[in-house]
Amino acid sequence: MFRRLAKLPLAVRVLCPVVAAVAVAALVVASANGSPQASPTSESDVQWTTSTELTTSSSAAEPSSSTAPTTTSVSSAAKSTSSSVPRPAAVAAPAKTEPRVEPPWFASRVAGATQVISVVGAGGSNATLSTWQKSASDWTQVVGATPAKVGSPGISTSYGESSSATPAGVFAITGAFGRQADPGAGVSYFRIDSSDWWVSDVNSPDYNTHQRCARGTCPFNESTSENLAEHGAVYDYALVMGVNSQRVPGAGSAFFVHVTNGAPTAGCVAIPASTLASIVRWVRPGTVIALSPR
């Protein structure tokens, strides 16, 4: 090979090694880039290839270089969306409410009384009795609904000496008495015997009061008055209702809450003995009884 080179012109001998060196360099670059190209290229080819490689390289790099900004952009958008959407207002938990308890029917009729015996008619001589205690503005039932007996005409505003109706209205409990010993009454209590009377004589100055006298010696008409002990077990315990407290002749007398015998009364209220005994212990001065036809 070197002999053949010696026969070539000087310019050729000088250029050939240069071209060879360029070719070798091109092969080395191609090998480094993984290109199968083994032949030298023209200047324009080199420029096109370089431009193409740069473009391809740039395009190939774009997804990688744009990945981070894209992630950042999505994160920013999420933050923006999160901050732009109004949060729902806090909803307060519903307040716990207690069931409303209606005041008893008599609440507006008993003035300042804090203990009330309620009697409500249930038709004919039947009624229902209950007792109530007031604390502050609240009423609490003490004795629940208890069957009671009243006068044959029921509870009425039309009552008097000539009627067996039980009076309607609100009246004070003025005392208690009975054939039995005092059970621990909260109001004045007297134990009766054959000398105890309730005067129903409309012509007597003692009309509608308790009096004591032996039979046959009384200053009032005994035949129209009531000997308490002679009525037996119905007066084992009794509460005095303050009906006709002004003692107007003929306006009514001897109205009591007493022990029932199962029959209609002559204008009183009658309940079982055990219930009445507990009420006698419960009452205090100022207790009232409220009676209504319905």
Image (cartoon, helix red, strand yellow):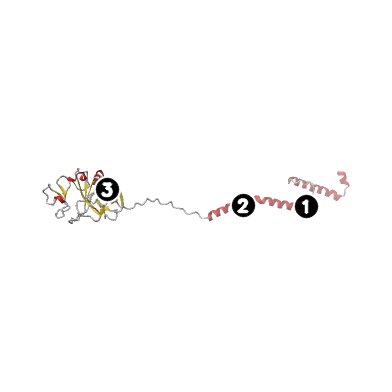
Q: Nearer the viewer, residue 105 or 260?
A: 260
Location of the N terminus by quadrant is top right
Relative placement, left or right, of 11 versus 162 is right
Image point 69% across, 52% down: which residue? 59
- Circle 1 packing at 10 Å, graded few (<14), some (14-19), many (20+), is few
Callout 1 secondary element? helix
- Of badges 1 and 2, the one in the foreground is 2
Query: How far across and how far down the image is residue 135, in percent?
Result: 29, 50
* Res. 148 in view: yes
Q: Nearer the viewer, residue 206 or 173?
A: 206
Image point 61% across, 52% down: which residue? 70
**Residue 261 location, quadrant:** top left
> Which residue is the site of mark 3?
148
Query: How far across and how far down the image is residue 21, in percent?
Result: 79, 47
The amino acid on which the numbered mark 3 sits, given as a three-letter code, is Ala
Mark 3 vs 1, N-terminal side = 1
- Of badges 3 and 2, the one in the foreground is 3
> Which residue is the site of mark 1?
45
- Circle 2 packing at 10 Å, graded few (<14), some (14-19), many (20+), is few
In the rendered structure, are the residues bearing label 1 and label 2 in contact, judged by CB atoms less than 8 Å apart?
no
In the rendered structure, are the residues bearing label 3 and label 2 in contact, judged by CB atoms less than 8 Å apart?
no
The amino acid on which the numbered mark 1 sits, given as a three-letter code, is Asp
